[in-house]
Amino acid sequence: MSNAPRHIAILGSTGSIGRNTLDVLRNLPEHFRVSVLTTNSNIDLLAEQVKEFHPRAVVILDAEKAESFRKNHAPRGLLVLSGKEGLTDVVRRSDVSLVVNALVGFAGLRPTVEAIRHKKDVAIANKETLVIAGEFITALVREHGVRLIPIDSEHSAILQCLLGEQDNPPARLILTASGGPFLQTPLERFGKVSVDEALNHPKWKMGNKITIDSATLMNKGLEVIEAHWLFGLPAERIEVVIHPQSIIHSMVEFMDGSLKAQLGLPDMKIPIQYALTYPARMPLNGGRIDFPQLQSMTFFEPDRKKFRCLQLAYDALAVGGTAPAALNAANEVAVEGFLAKQIGFDQIPLFIEKALEVHRVVQSPTLEQTITADHETRAFTRTLFPA
Ligand code: NDP
Ligand code: MG
């Protein structure tokens, strides 16, 4: 890495990826400076982060919380912004050269677009951005000549496997999936599973939305779409395999049948740090794999009937255009409904399927057409909720 420190904006610094990113930065003080931190509403944690990392600006989505933060927590000279415009304003700043997008859901889209348009590199955890507008985003990245580096562990694995293989196009990408908490639960029980059971992920400690997506396997479906846009392979050559130990984070097969895999303990700090230092590596404290203790790694095919969301994501990718944006919007609304105990776990795929049925697909959409598809599908999906 060069000697000059890079100036970073962390969007969603109070979330699971955001906090892990700050953990990584704590150990690399000579390489990075934190310029911007943001939260939806968690101003107490933001205040602690400000004290430790001394950013120049913060964004608090919630306007009232922003006002309270200004009064009670803001050190002199700190710029405190609020609202969605705050998020698009801060990524343009001249003291930001790398944006970590750790926002959840659709909220991540516009800040990503704005960052790329202003020639900032983006380390992206917010996979929804690529699901909603992958075609638009990847074209924008090429136009502006910036880096879009995945934080998602599977995509980080693939990126690492592809290093040095510029002249060897991958034949097949194999995304691994832990399988989530309901791998052994019969489909008949899906109507009865509680929010707490669904939030109890066996391998990863993550935010609520992605944890529910992992329980339905929609997360893997979103990752197939994310991989399609990041690595340019068609859906038929992107496969999913269940690997409950979560040690192999994904694999690439080449034309000679040779495979490369990236392995590591399931710790998001590894792909986060790699996205920040890419293509260099830096020391990182943490556990190391003990193979004799691990003993075995197992693999099996996902059950696409039981985990219907995975199939729906493949279907939306095959349809193309605005279909993945509609899939994502319906999923976000259904997951919110499940977390609020308004609908059952088994209704999540049903609502998404209905939303996709009524969605009128626009091929090669503009950004605004994509956003309209998102908003219309949200409104439709809400009409499916019980009164
Ligand atoms: P969290 O819910 O833990 O954190 C989300 C962050 O964004 C928080 O800082 C939250 O603020 C803020 N936020 C939430 N909604 C909004 C909004 N509408 N506008 C502005 N800010 C908002 O999520 P995760 O960290 O788990 O996930 C972030 C992204 O990374 C997701 O796209 C997820 O799929 C992806 N990802 C996550 C992994 C993980 O291990 N967690 C692994 C791979 C990918 P507040 O604290 O106030 O709620
Ligand atoms: Mg992942």
Image (spheres, rainbow, N blue to C red):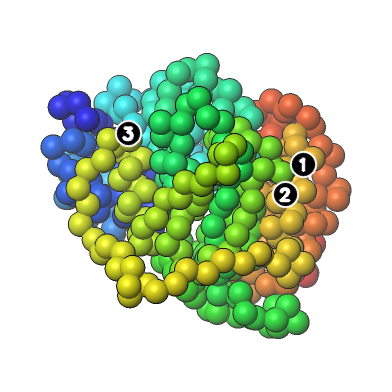
Q: Nearer the viewer, residue 244 or 385?
A: 244
Q: Quadrant of the C terminus?
A: bottom right
> Please, what secondary structure does the residue beneath circle 2 have?
helix
Mark 3–mark 2 distance (CA, rounded to whole Å): 31 Å
With respect to residue 203, does 83 lie above or below?
Answer: above
Eyeballing the image, is 304 above or below 35?
below
Q: Residues within 10 Å of mark 2 (few under 14, many from 20)?
A: many
Residue designated by label 3: 279
Q: Quadrant of residue 124?
A: top left
| Residue occupying image coordinates x 42% and y 28% | 147
- Residue that mark 1 sits on: 318
Q: Residue at x 55, y 74 (%)?
A: 181
Can you tell which of label 3 and label 2 is closer to the viewer? Answer: 3
Of label 3 and label 2, which has the lower sequence position? Answer: 3
Q: Does residue 126 appear to the left or right of 356 in the view shown?
A: left
Q: Quadrant of residue 278?
A: top left
Label 3 sits on what residue type? Pro
Numbered mark located on residue 383 in the image: none
Task: Give the SS element for disc 1.
Answer: helix
> Label 2, on which residue?
314
